[in-house]
Amino acid sequence: MDKIRELGLKGAEKMAKVFGKKKVVVVGDGRVGSSAVFALFQQSWINEVGVIDVVLPGHKDENGEWVKGFNAMHNVEGDALDMNDGASFLNGNGRVEGCDYSICDDADAVVITSGAPQKPGQTRLELLGANASIVAGVCKQLKSHLNDHCVVIVVSNPCDVLAWVAYKTLGIDSKRVIGSGCVLDSSRLKQEIGDDLGIDYRSVNATIIGEHGDSEVAAYSAASIGTTPIRQYYEEYKGISGAEWAFKCK
Ligand SMILES: NC(=O)c1ccc[n+]([C@@H]2O[C@H](COP(=O)([O-])OP(=O)(O)OC[C@H]3O[C@@H](n4cnc5c(N)ncnc54)[C@H](O)[C@@H]3O)[C@@H](O)[C@H]2O)c1
């Protein structure tokens, strides 16, 4: 921390200077994965972003009908080329590479986004059957390419359970396997409160705790606007108190 203060640097610039530039590999180049790659690619503390997807061979189904395989790595290669082509318009100076798991050998973090997303009406926990085998399969391939400092972040849902699947399959220290948990939900809550109050959501401190799913809880009692507890803020600036506040918290 002293070194950071001494250098007088901020944000991403600080990260790069103090901790060195980092390489992140994203597994799964779907909607979440490709957005993550694009966001990472623009960070000045990143020097390389890797992307991996799946190559599924064709097979016969239980009725003997041929099911065509697909090679999602073709999309990955195209996405990587497109992103590198646009690099001169961005802040970062890294590059994107689509490849196989050998690209993880020198990665600092691997982000797993592979797996089916929710369909309307489906809970995240209902994705477990399909996504547990995908995440376990990814981790089996990743295992022999994981160096001793790389951190694995599980985004595929249900992310808390799948972080445990990844931890068990990889057999590494639990501190190195992180589920993305309620990060997104907390950000959504901040935005909702910001919109409700008509203030910038960056002034809102609020967290969703528990499982990233239907049982998660908004920790209103610990929320604040700047340094003012949120309930006090609603009372003083919006004239909302008691039952009205309890209703809002629902
Ligand atoms: N944790 C969170 O906050 C959060 C938020 C949004 C989405 N998600 C989850 O992220 C996952 C991905 O969502 P999406 O919308 O990007 O889905 P998507 O269908 O757009 O993308 C999934 C990608 O995974 C790839 N894939 C499938 N099997 C693979 C394998 N064995 N190896 C490598 N890649 C493989 C697919 O080819 C596809 O490109 C879902 O499980 C979704 O529920 C989590």
Image: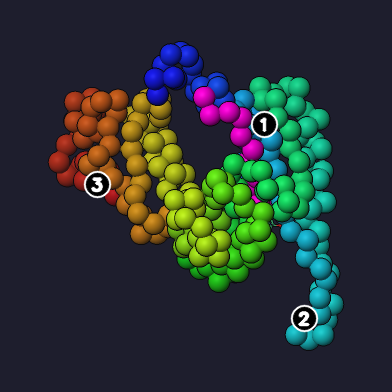
Question: Helix, strand, or loop for circle 3?
Answer: helix
Q: Is residue 243 visible?
A: yes
Give the residue type that dot 2 points to. Answer: Asp
Identify the residue under disc 2: 61
- Within the magenta stretch, is there residue 79? no
Give the residue type that dot 3 points to. Answer: Phe
The image's mark for residue 247 is 3
Within 10 Å of disc 1 (Cα), the crowding (few <14, some 14-19, many 20+) is many
Which image quadrant for residue 93?
Answer: top right
| Pick the front one: 7 or 59 | 7
The range drawn in magenta is 18-28
Residue at 47 percent across and 65 percent down: it is 125
Q: Is residue 31 visible?
A: no
Identify the residue under disc 1: 47
Residue at 38 percent across and 31 percent down: it is 194
Which image quadrant for residue 135?
Answer: bottom right
**Left-right relation of 226 to 93:** left
